[in-house]
Image: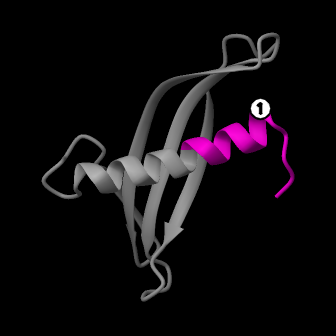
Amino acid sequence: MFDDMTFIHRKVFDDSGMSDSGTLVQIYYKYDTKNLNILVEDYSIHFIIDGVVGANIADDTDLVSDELYRLMFKSAYHELIDYVILNKKK
């Protein structure tokens, strides 16, 4: 039933100094339940300012450093693994 579907995992990194602001990371993936495998198809990173989600800036290294991209992506990816494959409870 879900074999050809792409799922989205979202993680919001809140800006502690400003309410309704932060960064949204979305990972588009397919999940193979038989082999317990995740295939990441794409991802996006958006700034959220005053509750408004901006454009995808994942490929714009002038706006955010590569290290910050990696940190946010890794954190969202590990959360995805924990909740989907390892089935940990929040």
Q: Residue at x 45, y 46 (%)?
A: 73
Q: Which x, y percent locates residue 20?
A: 49, 79
Specify the segment rendered in magenta.
77-90
- Foreground residue among 65 and 50: 65
Query: What residue did someone put label 1 on?
Result: 85
SS majority, magenta: helix
- Quarter of the image that includes the C terminus: bottom right
Q: Which x, y percent locates residue 82?
A: 73, 43
Asked if residue 32 lies left or right of residue 44, the reply is right
The answer to whether residue 69 is above or below residue 31 is: below
Element assignment for label 1: helix
Say what amino acid the circle numbered 1 marks: Ile
The answer to whether residue 25 is above or below residue 29 is: below
Asked if residue 34 lies left or right of residue 13, the reply is right
Q: Which x, y percent locates residue 68?
A: 33, 56
- Foreground residue among 76 and 53: 76
- Foreground residue among 60 and 85: 85
